[in-house]
Amino acid sequence: MSRTHGFPVQPLIMPRAHGGLPVQPHVMPHTHPFQPLVRSHTHGLDIQPLVTRRHVRTRKPLIQRLPVEIRCRIFYYCSATECRYDPKGISDANYINEHGDTDRDEKELRKAYQRVPRWIAILLVCHDWYHIAVNFSDLWIRLDFSSLRLTRVFLERSKSRPLDVVAFLPPDPDLQTLQLIMAHFPRIRKLLLFAWKADHLISILTARGGARRTHWRSSRSIHIFSRMVNDLITIDI
C-alpha cells in the first residue's frame, strides 16, 4: 500500500479468470446520461468513474451573433471595396481614359473582366451567411464580369434595384452577357463599356429596344470607350 499526501491508496488489482488472464470489465446500461456504471464479472462491484463528463454548452462565434443588418453591412463593404479595375483608387471611367491606350493595361482590364468577383466566397462560409447574402439585394447590383450564368444569378438576386454595369470587351467578344443586361436597361444606373469596335457597342445598345419600363427614376451616366476612337465618350441621360 502506498501513500499520497498522507492518505493510504489501495492499488488497483484487475480480477483474473481461471487461466490467469485479466477479465475485461462489462459496461452496464447507463443509469445517468453522464455517469455510466462499470461492473466486474467476478466481484459484481459498481464503480463510479473517476471523471464525469459534463454537458458543455457551445456558443456561436461573435460574428454569428451579430444582427442581420450589421452582417449585411459587412458583406456590402466586402463587395464595394474589392479592387478589380482601378488599383490606384480612381474611378473606372477615369482609369480607362488614362490607361486604356496601352496594350499592357488593356490586357489587365480584360483579364479582370473575365474573373469572378472574389467577395462571393462569403456564400461558402456557412448556411446563415449564404441565406443572408442571397436575400440582400444590394449585394448583387454591380455587374462587372463576363460570365453569362453569373449574370443571370445577379439579375435575379438584385430584384428591382438599380444596376451598375462595367464591361471590358476583347477584340472578338461574346455579347450574350451584355445583351441580357441591356434587356434590363431601365434599371441601369451606371454603364461603362470598353470595346474595340463601334459595331460591338451598337449591337449592345440596340439590345435595349424591347426593355420594359419600370417605376425607377434617376439620372444615368453612360460611358462608352471605343478602342478605334481612342477616347472616352460620356453621355448623361
Image (spheres, rainbow, N blue to C red):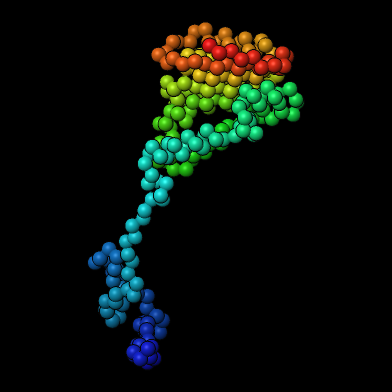
Q: Residue furthest right?
A: 103
- Identified at 49% across, 8% down, the residue is 210
Q: Quadrant of residue 117?
A: top right
Q: What number of labels is visible? A: 0
Residue 22 locus on image (x, y percent): 40, 80
138 sits left or right of 18 in the view: right
Q: Is residue 189 above or below residue 208?
A: below
Say which quadrant the N terminus sits in.
bottom left
Residue 160 appearing in the image: yes
Residue 172 locus on image (x, y percent): 69, 18
Residue 26 appearing in the image: no
106 sits left or right of 149 in the view: right
Q: Nearer the viewer, residue 148 or 223?
A: 223
- Identified at 52% across, 34% down, the residue is 79
Q: Nearer the viewer, residue 113 or 2?
A: 113
Q: Is residue 154 above or below residue 213?
A: below
Q: Quadrant of residue 232?
A: top right
- Identified at 38% across, 88% down, the residue is 4
Residue 5 locus on image (x, y percent): 37, 88
169 sits left or right of 151 in the view: right
Residue 207 locus on image (x, y percent): 55, 10
99 sits left or right of 71 in the view: right
- Identified at 49% across, 36% down, the residue is 77
